[in-house]
Image: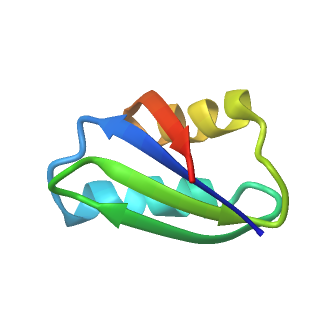
Amino acid sequence: MVQKVYDVKGMTCAHCVQAVSSELNGLFGVEDVQVDLPSGKVTVTSEQPLNPTAVAAAVDEAGYELVGGDSR
């Protein structure tokens, strides 16, 4: 398993959390998505490393902006 933490800009409510979680869970290989709304941190657990472009596109599709990430 691979876990990566992303910073997502623009999330302000539970609907934001649901939208981002739903889009990221739709990516192939994603096992779990945890969103910390106050910090804007999104932790994604996947079977293998995810394509950064696919992650950014999923966050964008949800209506938010991926602003960075740190591997854990």
Task: Give the vertical position of 27 relative to 70 (above or below).
Answer: below
The answer to which image quadrant residue 29 occupies is bottom right
Vertical side of 28 occupied by 9: above or below = above
Question: Does 54 sit left or right of 61 as displayed?
Answer: right
Residue in the picture at 82% in, 66% down: 47
Is 42 placed above or below 33 here? Answer: above
User: Where, quadrant-wise, is the N terminus in this rendering?
Assistant: bottom right
Tally of numbered tags: 0
For the residue pair 63 and 11, the one nearer the viewer reads as 11
At 71% across and 35% down in the image, what residue appears?
54
- 12 vs 18, left or right, is left
Instruction: Name the residue rendered at 47%, 43% in the picture.
Output: 6
Image color mode = rainbow
**Residue 55 in the image, given as x and y percentages of width and height:** 63, 39
Q: Which residue is painted at 57% across and 60% down in the image? A: 44
Q: Quadrant of residue 26?
A: bottom right
Horizontal arrangement in the rendering, residue 17 relative to residue 26 (left or right): left
User: Percent from the top left, x then y, of residue 16?
Assistant: 29, 54
Furthest-front residue in this view: 72
Image-quadrant location for residue 31: bottom right
Residue 53, percent from left and from top? 70, 27
* Quadrant showing the C terminus: bottom right
